[in-house]
Amino acid sequence: MKLHNLQPAAGSTHKEKRLGRGEASGKGGTSTKGNKGGQSRAGYQRKNAHEGGQMPIQRRIPKRGFKNNNRVAYKVFNLAQVQQITEKYGITEFSLENLYINGLVSRTDLVKVLGNGELTAKIAFKVNAVSAAAKTAIEAAGGTVEVLN
């Protein structure tokens, strides 16, 4: 095998259609685009949801509900989870930095602590929100709560 002998496999290449090169080619005149109309013009683009004149699906299906733009989404931790996390990672301060370092939250997450479960460890909390039940349980265990803004 030499460089001058190399060629593509049989049937793997095709001749390009030469459109608009005279009537004798069979592809002159309208260049296989049919007669008149938007699709025969330069720069034609079909709309994404066009279904050939049938009512598009996004218009057939009714609208439902709404999205609350003022919703604040918290990453929630119950006291039972907090107890497990402190035992597993050996942390005494439950803060956003410690949670991020240990891969439990992302940089932009807001953290809220809820009161489900029991807390036995004395832990200092620095979080974005705390429920009333969680706050009383934390203070009963000897911990402190600081709510960040």
Image: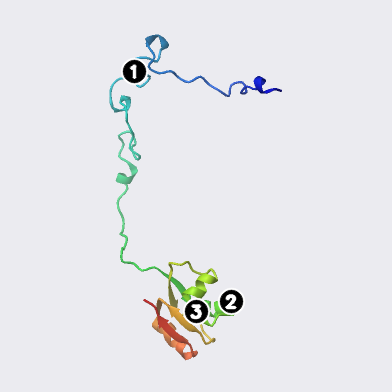
Find numbered disc 3 in the image and state the secondary structure of the residue it sits on.
strand
* Amino acid on which the number 1 mark rests in the picture: Thr
Residue 76: x %, y % from top left: 45, 72
* Residue picked out by circle 1: 30
* Amino acid on which the number 2 mark rests in the picture: Tyr
* Amino acid on which the number 3 mark rests in the picture: Phe
Looking at the rendered structure, which numbered label has been put on residue 123? none
Of pointers 1 and 3, the one earlier in the residue sequence: 1
Classify mark 3: residues with Cα within 10 Å, few (<14), some (14-19) or many (20+): some
Of pointers 1 and 2, the one earlier in the residue sequence: 1
Identified at 34% across, 15% down, the residue is 29
Residue 61: x %, y % from top left: 32, 48
Find numbered disc 1 in the image and state the secondary structure of the residue it sits on.
loop
Q: Residue furthest top?
A: 24
* Residue picked out by circle 3: 94
- Quadrant holding the N terminus: top right
On the image, which quarter does residue 26 sit in? top left
Q: CA distance from mark 1 to mark 3?
A: 73 Å
- 149 vs 82, left or right, is left
Q: Residue furthest right?
A: 1
Identified at 34% across, 40% down, the residue is 49
* Residue picked out by circle 2: 89
